[in-house]
Image: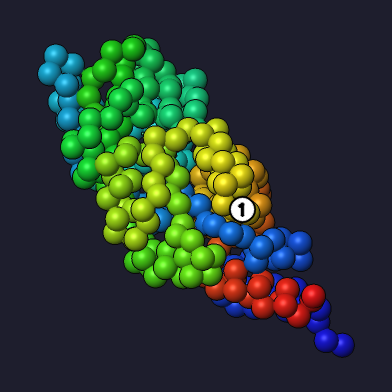
Amino acid sequence: ATMPPLLSAIANAGRHGVLVKSAVAMERLGEIDVAALDKTGTLTEGTPEVTAVRPLPGSGLDEDELLALAAAAEHPSEHPLARAVVAAAGLRGLRVPAAEEFAATPGRGVRATVEGCVVTVGRPRSYGEAADADGTTVLVERDGVPVGTVTLTDRLRQDAPVAVTALATATGRAPVLLTGDNPATAARMAAETGITDVRAGLLPEDKVDAVRELQRGEGKVLFVGDGVNDAPALAAAHAGVAMGRAGSDLALETADAVVVRDELTAIPAVVRLSRAARRLVV
Ligand code: ADP
Ligand code: MG
């Protein structure tokens, strides 16, 4: 027997390293009018590195003490920034104290009790434009008092510019970047991949609003993301694709398809496969 076209397309998508969850999902991937991409872990590799540790004067902390404090609060978190902070503390051979009462807020940061103090690590209250261009700076506070910052940088995926061009060709419109990170870093990463429509500083619910606005203005949206913070936008979009390697369980569960081989260019390839299959169906 010959396989129905959408099932053959799912098998072909598998050869490109993309797990498409159903025939309906396969169909939706070909119906999109515009792609919206998350930055951290999607456009970038998602393995950031700590490039600066800056205690605030008056905090009484040196660099190592600040990093150990941040690592303690980040230790239970699966966020790429958290893993990088913990790894940096490990590389410096620091003793990281235990954290209690850990809580994470997607798109904002973490909070935990460390040695009797409430420590938060997360998005600064405002962004200082020029200072941000070289990376993502997170603020560390102890009992509500800022004690320093940690700056992290993440590399663009090598195939990001090619994938962005292919998505633009496939949909007829350049992809949009939706990120919780600061505007300066978002703009630099976008410029390096050929994206001009950049929306930064977004909370998870702002990503949903952006997806809905695009769906009203431009048509059906494909959202690509990896984090817990991306799950609501993956659900709101006409089609959702999660990056599998570092993707959070919630993102993988919510998406219509998962990129298991870590290549962004597989996404436009699967959009084309879906379109070819739909031509055979109708
Ligand atoms: P993106 O949209 O780029 O994937 P997120 O929504 O995950 O980013 O995070 C947005 C911002 O929130 C980060 O740039 C950072 O300032 C802050 N943040 C989120 N999670 C953490 C964390 N675990 N540690 C420190 N900062 C965090
Ligand atoms: Mg992300």
Q: Is residue 275 left or right of residue 211?
A: right
Can residue 224 be spotted in the picture?
no
Which residue does the image show at 76% across and 66% down from the upper left?
A: 23
Q: Quadrant of residue 191?
A: bottom left
182 lies above or below 105: below
Q: Quadrant of residue 192?
A: bottom left
Between 264 and 113, the residue placed more toward the observer is 264
Residue 58, position as x, y percentages in the image:
14, 14
Q: Residue at x 67, y 78 (%)?
A: 276
Task: Kindly identify the amino acid type of the residue bearing the numbered disc 1.
Answer: Gly
Q: Residues within 10 Å of mark 1 (few under 14, many from 20)?
A: some
Relative height, residue 251 to residue 25 (above, below): above
Q: How many marks?
A: 1
Is 210 placed left or right of 82 in the picture?
Answer: right
Residue placed furthest toward the left: 57
Q: Secondary structure at mark 1?
A: loop
Furthest toward the bottom, the residue is 1
What x and y, as percent, mark residue 124?
32, 26
Q: Which residue is mark 1?
A: 219
Quadrant location of the C terminus in the rendered image: bottom right
Q: Residue at x 45, y 52 (%)?
A: 176
Q: With 277 as the anchor, is 63 left or right in this view? A: left
Depth order, front residue of 113/8? 8
Q: Please, is residue 9 above or below residue 128 in the view?
A: below
